[in-house]
Amino acid sequence: SVPWRGSQKRLFSSTETCRTVMPAWVIDKYGGNDVLRFTKNASFPIINYPNEVIVKVSAAGLNPLDVSMRGGYGAATLTMKRDPLNIKQSGSEFPLILGRDVSGVIMECGLDVKYFRERDEVWAAIPPWKQGSLSEFVVLSANEVSLKPQSLSHTEAASIPYVATTAWSALVNTGGLSKDNCAKKRILILGGSGGVGTFAIQMLKAWGAHLTVTCSQNAERFVRGLGADHVVDYTAGPVEEPLRALEKFDLILDNVGGDTERWALNLLKPWSGAKYVTLVTPFLQNTDMLGIADGMLQTAATMATKAVKHLVRGVHYRWGFFAPSGPALDEIRAMVDAGQIRAVLDETFSFSQVPQALEKVEKGHARGKTVVQIS
Ligand code: NDP
């Protein structure tokens, strides 16, 4: 395809803009950490559409999704999204670059890009069907990108976009929350100590909600420090028991999944518009197992059955999904620069330590985010 090249004066060196290859961590097949391969010869990204930008990656944030994708999770749906007409041969997603969060500098803009210029410092969450940020450069649509908060370093900024846009999509778009309607709402966050939880606590606290958070005992001080009002230790016994003793909730964000659905919806205020939003959904697992058509049918049937089952009891059951969004990141930037949200870094790694970084994410027990410094 013919690349759309911006006509602006080049601010990057000619060697940088004329390159055809770049360093990256790639996988050539699905599997464990041993499938990760460092190469200096990954394809340099190309602007294929006039609204795209190429970003020089300074830091890349990792998520549990990277570990799952390394093992092939979501491959059926993501391959269809990358190549809807099935023009390429099977296996065409390889070499695949993981990494969903990026903070970096715009190197080149497509002709229709209006709101960004070369040299702008930006952050973004990269959709899983696109090449990721464990590489020196990445191409994104301008509407997925936002100016980076000035108060954060690139390493700090790379810890936020994917979990923030996921929390935004789940709480604002699906849960109906906003800065204007949260005051005094009682919200329960199941799983508050990881990436999504640490972001959601801070955002909802800034909006005035009353937050009950579950986590393990050794994370209690940590989540209180982020804004949790009441903390319940899930390692002390069945967590639903202490939760049942509390006043009922207006919204539950479930970052844990598993058997929580059996009891969590009983903790909502019935017939008041209260919602349970879970991020742990069977969508990609269904399409991996059953294929796209049957997987989607199965997913729709499961979703509808559960929604109706709970609706007749006066509460709303919803699935939350990551949604890439530059505009959401613009709003989050304002909260970060106003001091309402901070980056919560668990551990940082160098570019040569990507396998160790993924191993860390795979071990679980996150306390915030794992970030790789790229350049
Ligand atoms: P992380 O791995 O960063 O955090 C998970 C946290 O949950 C850890 O701090 C862990 O710490 C804690 N935890 C584990 N078990 C429990 C439990 N039973 N009760 C309370 N806390 C628990 O994950 P993320 O925050 O990034 O993601 C959370 C979930 O959301 C994941 O399942 C992820 O796949 C999903 N997700 C879904 C998306 C979508 O589009 N639907 C998008 C993004 C995330 P410890 O084990 O020490 O207690």
Image (spheres, rainbow, N blue to C red):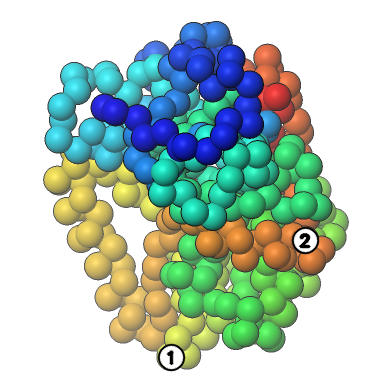
Q: In the rendered structure, which amino acid carries the disc numbered 2?
A: Asp
Nearer the observer: mark 2 or 1; the answer is 2
When the figure is inspected, residue 65 is found, relative to residue 162, above or below; the finding is above
Measure the C-alpha gap from mark 2 to mark 1.
38 Å
Q: Is residue 172 visible?
A: yes
Within 8 Å of ligand 1, the CB of disc 2?
no
For the N terminus, give its image quadrant. Answer: top left
> Which residue corresponds to mark 2?
337
| Mark 2 surroundings within 10 Å by alpha-carbon count, few (fewer than 14), some (14 through 19), many (20 or more) | some
Within 8 Å of ligand 1, the CB of disc 1?
no
> Which residue corresponds to mark 1?
271
Rendering coords of residue 335 (x, y %): 72, 65
When the figure is inspected, residue 274 is found, relative to residue 63, above or below; the finding is below
Quick one: SS at disc 1? Answer: loop
Specify whether 272 is left or right of 214. left
Q: Nearer the viewer, residue 363 or 355?
A: 355
Quick one: SS at disc 2? Answer: helix
Residue beneath the point at 59% across and 14% down: 15
Q: In the rendered structure, which amino acid carries the disc numbered 1?
A: Trp
Rendering coords of residue 169 (x, y %): 48, 63
Rendering coords of residue 270 (x, y %): 46, 87
For the C terminus, give its image quadrant. Answer: top right
N-terminal of the pair, mark 2 or mark 1, is: 1
Quarter where residue 101 is shown: top right
Residue beneath the point at 27% across and 20% down: 92
